[in-house]
Image (spheres, rainbow, N blue to C red):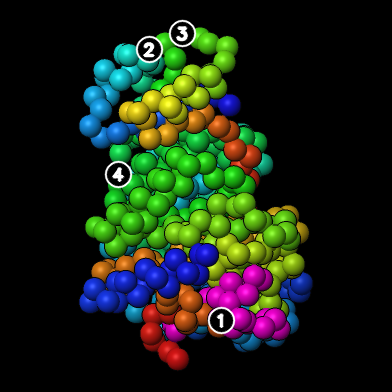
């Protein structure tokens, strides 16, 4: 049903003429980037030494070299809805234009009371970490950030709180919303709001909603990613196949690196020493950042580059590009370009932006 | 379920009059005349009010402000 909706919308618009090993010292740092941790950002960057040392499939990254060389997300407004954020993090603090707490409508979005407080900072770092020689490179380091706190530390959350978060993003006129969280039942008021934003937002071109599909290894039939108008993102691992934990099903549109044994290098909540030790590293005995949350952030950042390239591109055309220009990864057959475990395939940013075939 | 509910009223309906008529308090008004409301007095059976409103010709939909199981991913 989801596929039919997009196909119909794209045709309609076209007809209208709208346009492991911890010995890091053995691995040389990348020579084409000044960030000290860029070499281990395997999801967005192929570093031969790091790939060899960790037995990473050569295509496990998102093939974004040309895109990230030309575009930085400048001029694109991206909202991250998450549990909370370290707003003073030197990797993205200067990108923040707005903050909003959906629980009490305050400006405070810091999280202090959950073991998952790092999560919002981690997703944001994947997207927007600056080119500043401090740690890592985000996919869209110049994107404007609207950070919205949703109380994801609670087991249950009311429609009201979710609607408040969406409504704020809508009023700020954002282009993309990253949602590295999910609910397993979507009430009509939430569905109506998302439908409206994807239809009327961004000057009628449609706000791009990116949702992580989850990490339970199950078919999430009633998940929010099932909505026709959102982009559901699952995970691949360093073997360039679907991560075993990644949920699947009809709501899945695309997969991107979310990590397996290796995590996704990114920013951490607690800045103690202001050194690379403060980051969530790809290899860590303590904590790694992996899951469809990371994959969703990678897709959101990549779509920021796409929208910078063409600010007038409509949401249906974005989705159509995902449908047509994703790599058909994995060993399962794709029927009409899709299967339930990889969606339309694995993210290839340079292809998505028309910079490679 | 929270002690409030959503009601969407038709665009031609006066919001204030509608709320007063049904003794409802406005908590927040979203776009498209989607209202988050609660009864002006505590009631035991919120669902009965919601069911009654569903039959109201001024109402497009009405349903409780439910709580979802939410998860970081």
CA distance separating discs 4 and 2: 30 Å
Q: Are the residues flagged by discs 4 and 1 from a single subunit?
A: yes
Determine which residue is flagged by label 4: A171
- A287 lies left or right of A163: right
The magenta-colored residue range is A328-351
Taking depth in this image into account, of A304 and B32 the one nearest to the observer is B32
Q: Are marks 2 and 3 in contact (CB under 8 Å)?
A: yes
Determine which residue is flagged by label 2: B23
Quarter of the figure with the C terminus of chain A: bottom left
Determine which residue is flagged by label 1: A336
Residue at x-position 52% and y-position 80%: A326
Q: Chain of mark 3?
A: B
Report if residue A110 lies within the magenta region: no
Q: Chain of mark 2?
A: B
The image quadrant that residue A235 belongs to is bottom right
Residue at x-position 43% and y-position 73%: A7
Expressed as whole percent of the image width and height from the top left, the position of residue A258 reads: 62, 66
- A71 lies left or right of A280: left
Q: Are the residues flagged by discs 2 and 3 from a single subunit?
A: yes
Dot 2 crowding, Cα within 10 Å, few <14, some 14–19, many 20+: some
| Disc sitting over residue A214 in the figure | none
Determine which residue is flagged by label 3: B41
Helix, strand or loop at disc 3?
A: loop
CA distance separating discs 1 and 2: 54 Å
Residue at x-position 36% and y-position 41%: A168
Taking depth in this image into account, of A211 and A54 the one nearest to the observer is A211
Q: Chain of mark 1?
A: A
């Amino acid at each position: 049903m989801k596929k039919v909706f997009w196909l119909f919308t794209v045709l309609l618009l076209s007809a209208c003429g709208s346009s492991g090993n911890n010995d890091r010292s053995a691995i040389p740092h990348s020579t084409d980037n000044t960030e000290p941790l860029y070499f281990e950002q395997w999801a967005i960057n192929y570093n031969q030494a790091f790939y060899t040392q960790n037995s990473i499939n050569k295509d496990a990254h998102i093939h974004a070299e040309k895109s990230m060389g030309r575009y930085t997300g400048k001029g694109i407004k991206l909202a991250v809805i998450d549990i909370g954020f370290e707003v003073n993090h030197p990797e993205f603090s200067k990108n923040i234009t707005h903050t909003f707490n959906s629980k009490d409508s305050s400006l405070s979005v810091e999280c202090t009371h959950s073991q998952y407080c790092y999560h919002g900072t981690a997703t944001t770092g994947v997207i927007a970490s600056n080119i500043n020689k401090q740690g890592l490179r985000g996919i869209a380091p110049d994107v404007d950030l609207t950070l919205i706190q949703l109380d994801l530390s609670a087991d249950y959350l009311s429609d009201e709180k979710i609607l408040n978060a969406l409504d704020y993003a809508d009023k700020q006129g954002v282009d993309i919303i990253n949602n590295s969280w999910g609910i397993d039942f979507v009430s009509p008021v939430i569905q109506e709001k998302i439908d409206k934003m994807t239809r009327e937002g961004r000057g009628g071109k449609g706000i791009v909603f990116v949702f992580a599909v989850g990490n339970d290894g199950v078919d999430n039939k009633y998940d929010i990613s099932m909505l026709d108008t959102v982009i559901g993102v699952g995970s691949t691992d360093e073997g360039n196949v679907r991560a075993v934990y990644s949920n699947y099903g009809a709501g899945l549109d695309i997969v991107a690196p979310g990590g397996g044994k290796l995590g996704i290098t990114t920013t951490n909540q607690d800045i103690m020493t202001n050194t690379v030790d403060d980051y969530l590293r790809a290899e860590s005995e303590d904590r790694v950042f992996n899951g469809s949350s990371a994959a969703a952030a990678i897709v959101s950042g990549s779509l920021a580059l796409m929208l910078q390239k063409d600010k007038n591109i409509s949401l249906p055309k974005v989705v159509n590009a995902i449908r047509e220009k994703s790599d058909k990864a994995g060993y399962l057959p794709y029927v009409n370009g899709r299967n339930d475990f990889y969606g339309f395939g694995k993210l290839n940013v340079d292809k998505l932006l028309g910079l490679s075939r | 379920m929270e002690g409030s509910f959503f009601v969407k009223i038709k665009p031609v309906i006066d919001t204030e009059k509608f709320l007063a008529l049904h003794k409802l308090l406005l908590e927040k008004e979203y776009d498209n005349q989607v209202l988050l409301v609660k009864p002006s007095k505590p009631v035991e059976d919120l669902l009965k009010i919601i069911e009654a409103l569903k039959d109201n010709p001024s109402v497009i939909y009405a349903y409780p402000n439910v709580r979802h199981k939410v998860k970081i991913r």
